[in-house]
């Protein structure tokens, strides 16, 4: 086997950085609603793990086989950037899932509590009113009673 | 099916949201999270300045106030999609 006469480029840390970028970019894709959206948190973790594998392999090449691969400094820089992105991905994963359980919330087949809350014009609106036919107002025509009401509780607009 | 959004935001904040996003469905305010508590979906100190907010939750409620479909996400980045909610509503006869 002939001895390596040429010092090769070390592309592995770049691969690691690309996977780290893909991991953090998964968080942007959440704004696009598509059927497999529920897989994105796990996909981001998978990309982060692959990124770490590439980054470690890249460092090993740069420092373990300096005769075969060049680029000690670039591999360290790329690993540092990659690890920051991996860290952010992990932080996003943990903080996005810090949600209390909804085990005691009304479940399918159970009756929900009635309520009366203010709408955007500070006018009180009850669940009974929402389930009933709406009377015509200046802004909206009369609507028949809906088959159902979809209550969407959200975190708020900030 | 009539969609209704509920959060701890004040009517002013919700009106701003409705205007910016062009929403015409009712958006209700539960500033003290009283109803959110009654539905057992409070996220204590979950707001940006540490105030109590709702965890994301969707309930499809029929005319007898019975839950016919619900969705409680485990990740704030993953929410019920419009097509899922419409499909659940279409199942009701």
Image (spheres, rainbow, N blue to C red):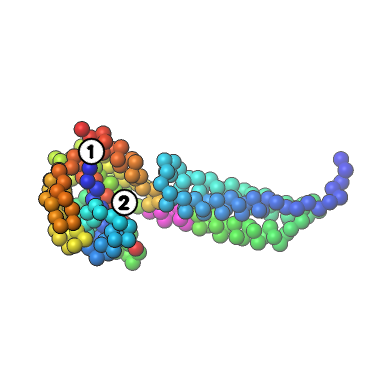
User: Element under label 1?
Assistant: strand
At a point 25% along the width and 54% down the height, the residue shown is B24
Residue B86 horizontal side relative to residue A55, left or right: left
Question: Of the residues under marks 1 and 2, which one precedes in the sequence?
Answer: 2
Range covered by the magenta-colored residues: A91-98
Q: Residue B74: where, in percent of width, then height?
A: 37, 47
Chain ID at mark 2: B
Residue B71 seen in the figure: yes
State the SS at label 2: loop
Corner quadrant of residue B9: bottom left
Q: Quadrant of residue B68?
A: top left
- Taken as a whole, is the magenta stretch helix, strand or loop? helix
Is A89 inside the magenta-drawn segment? no
Q: Nearer the viewer, residue A63 or B16?
A: B16
Q: Which residue is rendered at x = 64% and y = 58% of the image? A: A78
User: Would you name the residue on which mark 1 appears?
Assistant: B68
User: Which is more toward the observer, B4 or A55?
Assistant: B4
Q: Residue at x 31, y 51 (%)?
A: B56
Inspect this view and state whether residue A156 appears.
Answer: no
Q: Which residue is mark 2?
A: B56
Q: Where residue B80 sits in the image (x, y, percent)? A: 34, 45
Q: Position of residue A69 (x, y in %)?
A: 77, 53
As for residue A92 lying within the magenta part, the answer is yes
């Amino acid at each position: 086997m002939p001895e390596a006469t040429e010092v090769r480029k070390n592309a592995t840390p770049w691969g690691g950085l690309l996977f780290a970028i893909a991991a953090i970019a998964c968080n942007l894709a959440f704004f696009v609603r598509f059927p497999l959206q529920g897989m994105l948190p796990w996909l981001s973790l998978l990309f982060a793990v692959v990124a770490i594998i590439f980054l470690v392999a890249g460092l090993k090449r740069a420092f373990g086989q300096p005769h075969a691969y060049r680029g000690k400094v670039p591999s360290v820089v790329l690993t540092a950037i990659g690890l920051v992105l991996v860290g952010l991905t992990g932080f996003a994963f943990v903080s996005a899932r810090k949600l209390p359980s909804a085990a005691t919330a009304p479940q399918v087949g159970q009756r929900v509590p009635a309520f009366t809350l203010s709408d955007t014009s500070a006018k009180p609106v009850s669940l009974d009113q929402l389930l009933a036919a709406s009377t015509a107002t200046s802004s909206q025509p009369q609507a028949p009673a809906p088959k159902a009401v979809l209550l969407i509780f959200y975190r708020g607009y900030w | 099916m009539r969609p209704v959004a509920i959060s701890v935001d004040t009517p002013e904040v919700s009106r701003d949201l409705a205007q910016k996003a062009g929403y015409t469905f009712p958006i209700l305010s539960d500033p003290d999270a009283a109803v959110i508590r009654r539905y057992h979906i409070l996220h204590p100190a979950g707001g940006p300045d540490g105030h109590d907010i709702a965890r994301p939750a969707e309930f499809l409620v029929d005319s007898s106030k019975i839950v016919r479909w619900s969705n409680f996400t485990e990740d704030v980045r993953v929410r019920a999609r419009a097509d899922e909610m419409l499909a659940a509503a279409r199942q009701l006869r």
